Amino acid sequence: MAGAAVRTVLSLLAVVALILVAGWLMRRVQAGDGLSRRAVRVLEGVSVGARERVVLVEVGTTQLLLGVAPGQVRTLHVLEQRIERAAPAAAPRFADVLQRLRRSAGAAP
């Protein structure tokens, strides 16, 4: 009875370990060790309708503005000057937000 339970637990641990190893391998294969860069990168995208999007794509050194809809992709514009992506603004610290909320709650009647 105890032997069967131990065997079941060990089998379960082996399956979980196999799943984790397979996931790690898949990420390594998809990442390509950072040696190969992707030729096409999506820089930005915005939805302009229920199923339509405008996407800024970089192919090598060329940037393209594409219109994407179900079943079709159209080149809207080939950019002559590259659009540099700005660094995202830093989010306010939680402590600062909490302190500001406490001040505003204390000032209210």
Image (spheres, rainbow, N blue to C red):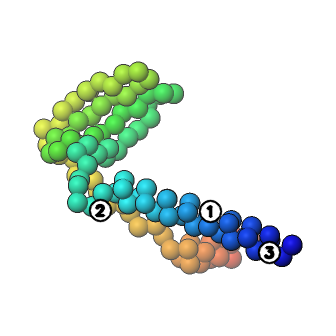
The residue lying toward the viewer, choosing from 68 and 27, is: 27
Task: Give above or below for 10 relative to 87.
Answer: below
Q: Residue furthest left?
A: 80
Disc 1 crowd rating (10 Å Cα; few below 14, some 14-19, many 20+) is few
Give how far across and how far down residue 109 sits, in percent. 74, 71
Q: Which residue is mark 1?
A: 15
The residue lying toward the viewer, choosing from 21 and 89, is: 21
Disc 2 residue type (three-letter): Asp
The residue positioned 56% from the left and 60% from the top of the image is: 19
Q: Secondary structure at mark 3?
A: helix
Q: CA distance from mark 1 to mark 3?
A: 18 Å
Residue 3, label in figure: 3
Q: Which residue is mark 2?
A: 33
Q: Secondary structure at mark 2?
A: helix
The residue positioned 68% from the left and 76% from the top of the image is: 106
Examine the image and state in which quarter residue 78 appears.
top left
Q: Earlier in the sequence, mark 1 or mark 3?
A: 3
Horizontally, is 1 left or right of 57 in the view? right
Q: Residue furthest top?
A: 71
Give how far across and how far down residue 29 sits, in percent. 36, 56
The residue lying toward the viewer, choosing from 90 and 22, is: 22
